Image (tube, rainbow, N blue to C red):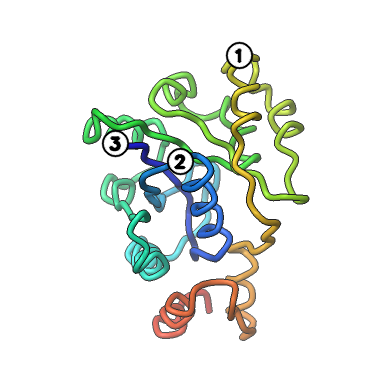
Amino acid sequence: MRIGVFGGSFDPVHLGHLIAAECAREQAQLDQVVFVPAAAPPHKPGRILAEGRHRLEMLSLAIGGHDPFAVSSIELDRGGTSFTVDTLTELAGTHPDDTLVLLLGPDALAGLPTWREPERIATLAEIVAVERDSLDDLAAAMAAGGLADLLGTDAVAVILARRVRMPAVGVRATGLRAAVAAGRSIRYRTPRAVERYIATHGLYR
């Protein structure tokens, strides 16, 4: 199996996340996409997230009924700072016969050289970039991040050629949190079940 690994804060999950995952599933020929909410993202130090149990439940509600999607609590269970290399190592151990595919947006991909053990990450998983039409410039981001020095020019060319393209969805979790805090609607930017969950549990107010 080819298993896509889609990490992030998912605070909250929104339609942009789901569209990106579905485009990746189809274009990168993935058998499954696993959403992995972080316990404490290393690139967001000091940011207070909604409790892990809430983010996990919102993800479960968001993907309900779509069998190729799954949610993993691996990073929440491990606790502490969530490093991708640790997650991939653990997943590789439990899926020894499967191919792990790490899904990254342009910003995350550009920052990969600064992550913990980036060389090992590249050996544990195939890297697939997700680019939003008209909003992202994957080639520029990769050049600015010095990714060729880490992976080599041939590998960078492969990532560019195999990029996943998705519609220009400009929904961001920061905007949803701000809208909820201000009492504004978030309808049609996140699944209705997630919208209800946020209201029921008084999140982001």
* Side of 119 where 34 appears, left or right: left
Q: Residue type at mark 1?
A: Gly
Give the mark, 2 or 1, whose residue is nearer the N terminus.
2
Q: Position of residue 47 (x, y in %)?
A: 53, 55
Tell me the residue at 41%/50% (across/down). Answer: 38
- Rendered residue at 36%/54% (across/down): 68
Structural crowding at the residue carrying mark 2, measured as other residues with C-alpha within 10 Å and reported as few (<14), some (14–19) or many (≥20): few
Instruction: Say what amino acid the circle numbered 3 marks.
Output: Leu
- Left or right, residue 148 beside residue 68: right
Q: What residue is at 35 percent from the left and 65 percent from the top? A: 60
Residue density around tag 1, few if under 14, some if 14–19, many if 20 or more, within 10 Å: few
**Numbered circle sitting on residue 91:** 3
Q: Secondary structure at mark 3?
A: helix
Closer to the chain start, of discs 2 and 3, is: 2
Camera-side residue of 121 and 20: 20
131 left or right, relative to 67: right
Q: Give the x, y percent position of residue 43.
A: 54, 42
Judging by the rendered image, the residue that carries numbered circle 2 is 29
Query: Who is closer to the viewer here, 92 or 64?
Result: 64
User: Given this view, does label 2 or label 1 mark the residue nearer the observer?
Assistant: 2
Q: Establish if 146 lies above or below 10.
A: above
- Give the image quarter of residue 19: bottom right
Q: CA distance from mark 1 to mark 3?
A: 25 Å
State left or right for residue 203 relative to residue 154. Answer: left
Which residue in the structure is indicated by mark 1? 152
Q: Please name the residue shown 29% across and 32% down the image.
A: 98
- 182 shown above or below 141: below
